[in-house]
Amino acid sequence: MSQDDATALEQEVEAQLAAEREAFEARFPPEAFTGIAKALKVRPTPENLAVLRDGLLEDFYFNFDVGHQWKEPTRKEQIARLKKLCEAATTLHSLLTGFDIWWNLPLGLLAPDDLDAAGEGVTDQFVPKLKRLADTAAGAIEELASKQSRRGRPAKNARFRGLTPLLIREYEWLMKEPACCPYWLPDSGVYGGKGSFYPFARAVWCCLRENLPADARDAIPSTEPALAQELLKHWPKDRSKR
């Protein structure tokens, strides 16, 4: 691939990522932050909504947009890829050592370092290199196969849990007061807390639930009690330290 081709490909990827991000952000127009403004007891003017949107939207994107996030291959997928690599290396090694195919081998596909000085065959190191590659892949397959499969999915609401400290930071910057741990109010039958942090977090949760694409909604708590429990996990068990 030439430098121009690589540059064009890089620009194409960047343009695609920018379009995907623009589509994600379009799901959160300024008016979607009205409930958050009300929870903070500020007027939902265009200026205030713009401030809230600017402060939260980037955190929304990097925590909940599933399109740009790299996903680790499963153990089964890793084994399948290693098998393909092992089979390819073994097949080529067998061809090179089984009989003379130099006149038909597409040497142009090999790197210069793998060709002999005359450019008419492979070096003495190339065939053993294929054997090591096949053996290494086979060993990795055996090691992966011997491990017990990790069952289950990533912790439920893990991405929302990652958002919690960002919400605390944003709240404390906006309100100039510490965010406090929510707690159950038995007389009212709801969760609450000192200050407006819990209403703010609840309004953010409602905003996400209403505007996230369907394939990302399972990353947030499904009910308000579940939301409160997720927020509680951020604070130490000794509530006196909050």
Image (cartoon, rainbow, N blue to C red):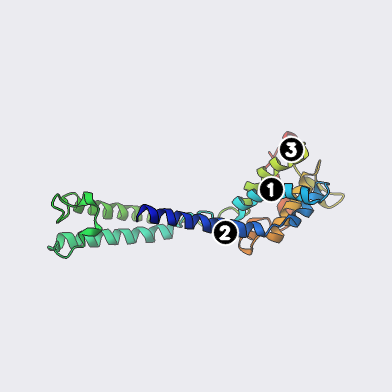
Tell me which residue sits at (66%, 42%) in the image.
Answer: 165
Question: Mark 1 to mark 2: distance in Å?
Answer: 18 Å
Q: Quadrant of residue 98?
A: bottom left
**Residue that carries the numbered disc 3 in the rendered image:** 239
Please determine whether, in this image, residue 170 is positioned above or below residue 209. above
Query: Residue 19, labelled with which disc?
Result: 2
Q: Earlier in the sequence, mark 1 or mark 2?
A: 2
The front one of 158 and 124 is: 124
Instruction: From the viewer's perspective, tell me whether residue 178 is left or right of residue 76.
Output: right
Q: In the rendered structure, are the residues bearing label 3 and label 1 in contact, judged by CB atoms less than 8 Å apart?
A: no
Question: Where 195 falls versus 155 (above or below)?
Answer: above
Q: Earlier in the sequence, mark 3 or mark 2?
A: 2
* Residue 148 visible within the image: no
The type of residue carrying mark 1 is Asp
Q: Secondary structure at mark 1?
A: helix
Q: Which residue is mark 1?
A: 54
Mark 3 or mark 1: whose residue is earlier in sequence:
1
Tag 2 secondary structure: helix
Pick the quarter of the image with the N terminus. bottom left
